[in-house]
Image (cartoon, grey):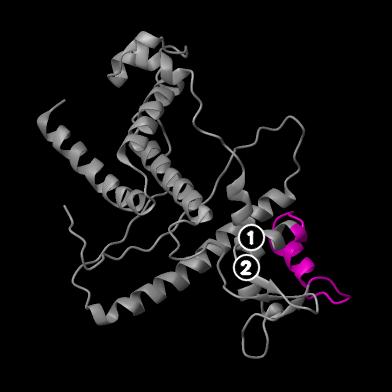
Amino acid sequence: MPASLNDVIKKMLIQIFRPLVRMLLRLNVPFHVVSDILKWVYVDVANKYFGINNKKPTKSRIAVITGLSRIQVDQQLKLNLFNADNSHRKWHRAGRVLTGWVEDKDYQNHHGKPKIIAIEDDSNINFTKLVEKYSGGATYKSVLDELLQAEAVVVNSDNQVELIKPFYLSENDPDDIQNVDFLGLSTQYLLETIDHNIDPDRDHPRFQRIVLHDKLPKSLANLAESYARKKSQELANDVDEYIEHLIQHSELEDDQELIPYIGVGIYFYKADNDENPL
């Protein structure tokens, strides 16, 4: 490997690892746990994606490209550390319901705030109708259970639902399972897009943009963030509604191939005061 490329890879890894390690240390995850998982991922990825002529790689090939011994490769192949589930669908659907509750004028009071709504009644403005409109097919009970668990809503003695916080993931809680799950998924999707775009064997690069500025006065940072948040939320809602429209109005046949997931990720970046860019 050329020295210049080696230096760039080291820098890239440090840039990725720094915020990740900061979070892992807050979660009390020791190095040896991460090391064991990384070893398994190396073998798992090599086994799935680095065969030759569409054939599974041999253990010897996996050992060569990962730098592990054949014994270590054999040990890792016998493990299954990743338990895939659909938990992301829960918080995605719940988040869409909360967004609809906050932004749909039918669900706002005369002050522009989310109404306290009945779970079910004879009107068209209740929690059940809200879930039907925005969740994409989930039952009102499953969404309500998720929102109650996330402490985003409360149910009063009159069987009415009140919105407590307009977001599904708990903020500033390092032990929150949903936040950690969200971290894994959102980071995975971003890195998958970057990997796709820099892979010379793949055509049709996916959309990927980043906008960065320096020398912005600190007193104006909140204005910049508010503007970015407003415009980004509008875009996210528009894309989400359009894709859901395509799904709802598609004439799916039994043998039609479906993709596991599709979407757009948006994030706002601002350097912390103690940030030390490389």
Kindly check if marks 2 and 1 are in contact, taking CB atoms under 8 A apart as contact.
Answer: yes
The span picked out in magenta is 119-141
Q: Which residue is mark 1?
A: 94
Secondary structure of the residue carrying tag 1 is: helix
The image quadrant that residue 97 belongs to is bottom right
The answer to whether residue 36 of the structure is visible from this angle is yes
- Considering depth in this image, is 148 or 104 the residue closer to the camera? 148
The image quadrant that residue 196 belongs to is top left
Question: What residue is rendered at 37% in x and 63% in y?
Answer: 268
**Residue 269 x, y percent position in the rendering:** 33, 63
Indicate whether residue 185 is drawn in magenta: no
Crowd tier of the residue under label 2, counting other residues whose Cα lies within 10 Å: few below 14, some 14–19, many 20 or above: many
Q: Seen from this angle, which residue lies furthest left?
A: 3
Q: Seen from this angle, which residue lies furthest bottom?
A: 110
Amino acid at circle 1: Ala
Indicate whether residue 128 is drawn in magenta: yes
Crowd tier of the residue under label 1, counting other residues whose Cα lies within 10 Å: few below 14, some 14–19, many 20 or above: many
Q: Is residue 17 left or right of residue 4?
A: right
Amino acid at circle 2: Leu
In this rendering, is residue 192 above or below 276?
above
In this rendering, is residue 275 above or below 185?
below
**Residue 10 x, y percent position in the rendering:** 19, 38
Secondary structure of the residue carrying tag 2 is: helix
Q: Which residue is mark 2?
A: 98
Question: What residue is rendered at 30% in x and 48% in y?
Answer: 21
